Amino acid sequence: MKTALFPSRVVPADVTDPSPALGYAERNAAYWRRNLAICVLGSFTTLVSLSMLLPFLPLYVARLGMTTQAQVVQWSGIAFGATFLGTAVTAPIWGRLADRYGRKPMLVRAAIGMAVVMSLIGVARSVTDLVLLRLLAGLVGGYASASIVMIGTQAPRERAGWALGVLSTGALAGNLIGPLIGGFLPGLVGIRGTFFVGGAMIAAAAVATIAFVREDFDRSIDAKPRLAQASGGSPAASPLVIGALLATAMMVLLANMSIEPIITVYIGQLGVRHDHLARAAGIVMACSAFGSMLTAPRLGALADRIGAWKVIIGCLAATGLVMVPQALVTQWWQLAVLRGVMGMSLAGLLPAIAKLVRHAVTEHNSGKTLGYLQSAQFTGQVLGPLLGAQVGAHAGLREVFFVTAALLLAAAAANGWVHARYIEACPSRA
């Protein structure tokens, strides 16, 4: 029920509202399953559109005036990373606005903004235009990030891990299928036409979001602090806990992306013929996403049953251990299998982290904090390739796997320590 336009009493700004009115999650309990379905579809569509340019990005950069191989490689990397940088910068801002004005407006804003920018990329006149438009796509977009904010705040506590795991599956599927579509679509509609197709796909997601996503958002209730008992939430966690979770989220993407700059060269060292390198590298890259798709909902549900902290620590340790044999393979297919296993263990991390972050903060700050979580993930997506390239260039390709494994195992130990202190400080949160 909405509050009156002119309330009969005025509560000072520094006094927490003791009203027993239903919290945001309780009022939206009837909508979260349908919203989850639309968000999965929208996340899949937008990430297909963003990732399908990977196979032909160097060709487009060359068409925009870059002539030497060094220029093409350099500007392709800049254009690819620009979107992640833009999203990392603005995700907390959009999360804060979601806390103030509702989650659905952020979904609609992201879909419309990305549809327009994606279409504009198709008429870029120079490589500078391409980079700026890719950056703008990150600044104004972020449909998948907005979806995590909506589902993370609407899903019941006991189903949050499963719901976020399902949502993660849609995003992973988009990242997996996008490059496959990008491999043949330019042959049908041309490189520039591919961007118009991508814009149309995102526009369809925007229409579905406007038509079918439902939200009961009352700014007079949801945009201000409320007692934990009134909202059904938990008292805010310590900055140590939030910081550890954000750092872990960054580490997940860093670990997954650290191999990207070296994978083709590494496979070449395993004896793969030059004319088969691109295909083998594509299969190896896809195996990680495919493995994650298989286990993300299951590990999310496991986090609901046994606790998210246990899933995070276990998955970090398992991923770190699986990294080690990747440095010792002698055949490319062995690497593909191990990357698939690694993807299966990585899949449990982001849903479990998002679940903990959501329930570690007060309800009126959930969107902002989940926005910081998205920012941390995209930061890892930027730092991962940089780490892999530097270690590979100065220490060796196999050492990339050892360094990443050490970082993951250190993260597992750090999370175990934080979890122990967290339980000691507040046993009810175990």
Image (cartoon, grey):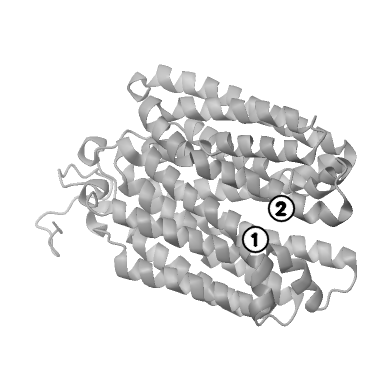
Position above or below: 205 against 267: below
State the mark number for residue 316.
none
Q: Which residue is drawn at 52% across and 49% down?
A: 374
Residue placed under numbered mark 1 in the picture: 179
Q: Where is residue 34 in the image (x, y as percent from the top left)?
A: 30, 56
Q: Can residue 322 be seen in this view?
A: yes
Q: Local crowd at mark 1 within 10 Å, few (<14), some, or many (≥20)? A: many
The picture quadrant where one finds residue 49 is bottom right
Position above or below: 40 against 327: below
Question: In the depicted view, which residue is nearer to us: 258 or 359?
Answer: 258
Q: Which residue is drawn at 48% across and 36% down?
A: 242
Residue placed under numbered mark 2 in the picture: 282
Side of 90 relative to 183 (left or right)? left
Q: Position of residue 46 (x, y in %)?
A: 52, 64
Position above or below: 324 against 18: above
Side of 64 relative to 235 (left or right)? right
Q: How many marks?
A: 2
Q: Position of residue 231 (x, y in %)?
A: 24, 41
Q: Can residue 383 be seen in this view?
A: no
Position above or below: 264 against 314: below
Q: Position of residue 156 (x, y in %)?
A: 29, 41
Q: Which residue is drawn at 33% across and 59% down?
A: 102
Q: How far apart are marks 2 and 1 (CA)?
A: 9 Å
The picture quadrant where one finds residue 405 is top right
Asked if disc 2 and disc 1 are in contact, CB closer than 8 Å, the reply is yes
